[in-house]
């Protein structure tokens, strides 16, 4: 998942972590990797004779501050980045890594991750600790179905994940924790993850980072074609997050 300057909504319990000014937001056309460019509309003085932008005129037509704030939040959600994702069991991690290395022309990057999931009334909220003093707070919405699925997310980086974990744990409660070692490959616009998950085993994830002009169907086609190249069968596909799989295992035992 890539970094975003938009902050996560903490399920309506903690409010907005970051509230930008009332701005026009335009997405980068370079594959969505750069943060959104903001063109802020300042309040005009009576002596300012410049013609306001269409967004400025729209704001001036609204007299209710609540409506203005709602409009700004709606505008932010409209540019929420998205992936098309696939998750599957991997019975032969060595063979999978070899194919991923050939396709990406790299040996991949090893990343250690500790994900803490918090109680959330809708979607998912997790704090990802990279175990090096940095982390990310990630809010995402994704259906629990097998096969390619659309995931919309917001990410806020942190340089103090331990303190943030303490605050969120006190405020929301912890749902559970996932520890894994991830080997990351990049194939075109897709991030290929080979994960060794504590308590679960070996899995792979594909994250097709959607471009602004692409449809969900385009992303699904990219994911399915890469699945075939990597030798991932439909029978090995799984639903839900690693946290869900761990909780299901706890219930069975």
Image (cartoon, grey):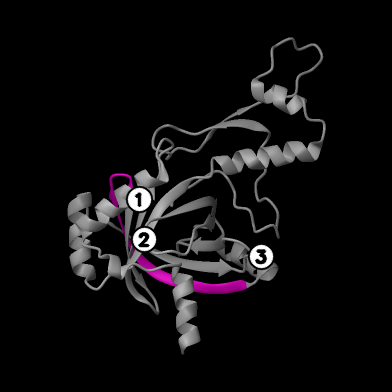
| Sequence-first tag of 3 and 1 | 3
What residue is shown at x 41% (from left), y 46% (from top)?
A: 216
Residue drawn where x is 48% and y is 84% of the image? 250
Q: Residue 78, percent across and down?
A: 57, 40
| Residue at the spot 46% in from the left edge and 77% down from the top edge | 246
Residue 177 among those drawn in magenta: yes
Q: Is residue 2 visible?
A: no
Picture quadrant where residue 69 is located: top right
Residue 8 magenta = no
Name the side, left or right, on which 11 lies relative to 216.
right
Q: Residues within 10 Å of mark 1 (few under 14, many from 20)?
A: many
Which residues, given as a range, are shown in magenta? 174-190
Mark 3 vs mark 1: give the one in front: 1
Q: Position of residue 2 (x, y in %)?
A: 44, 48
Residue for badge 3: 167
Name the residue located 44 percent from the left edge and 37 percent from the top edge: 212
SS for callout 3:
helix
């Amino acid at each position: 998942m890539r970094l975003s300057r938009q902050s996560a909504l903490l399920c309506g319990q903690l409010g907005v972590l970051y509230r930008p000014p009332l701005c026009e937001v335009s997405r980068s056309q370079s594959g969505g990797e750069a943060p959104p460019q903001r063109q802020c509309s300042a309040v005009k003085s009576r002596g300012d004779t410049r013609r306001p932008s269409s967004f400025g005129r729209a704001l001036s037509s609204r007299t209710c501050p609540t409506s203005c704030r709602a409009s700004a939040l709606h505008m932010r959600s409209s540019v929420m980045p998205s992936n098309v994702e696939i998750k599957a069991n991997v019975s032969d991690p060595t063979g999978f890594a070899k194919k991923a290395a050939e396709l990406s022309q790299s040996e991949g990057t090893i990343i250690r991750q500790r994900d803490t999931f918090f109680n959330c009334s809708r979607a998912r909220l997790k704090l990802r600790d990279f175990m090096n003093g940095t982390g990310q707070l990630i809010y995402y919405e994704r259906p629990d179905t097998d096969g390619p699925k659309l995931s919309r997310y917001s990410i806020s980086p942190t340089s103090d994940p331990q303190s943030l974990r303490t605050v969120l744990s006190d405020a929301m409660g912890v749902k559970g924790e996932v520890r894994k070692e991830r080997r990351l490959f990049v194939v075109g616009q897709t991030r290929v993850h080979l994960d060794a998950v504590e308590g679960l085993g070996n899995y792979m994830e594909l994250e097709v980072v959607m471009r602004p002009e692409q449809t969900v169907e385009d992303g699904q086609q990219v994911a399915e074609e890469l699945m075939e190249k990597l030798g991932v069968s439909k029978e090995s596909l799984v639903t839900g997050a690693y946290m869900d799989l761990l909780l299901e295992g706890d219930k069975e035992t």
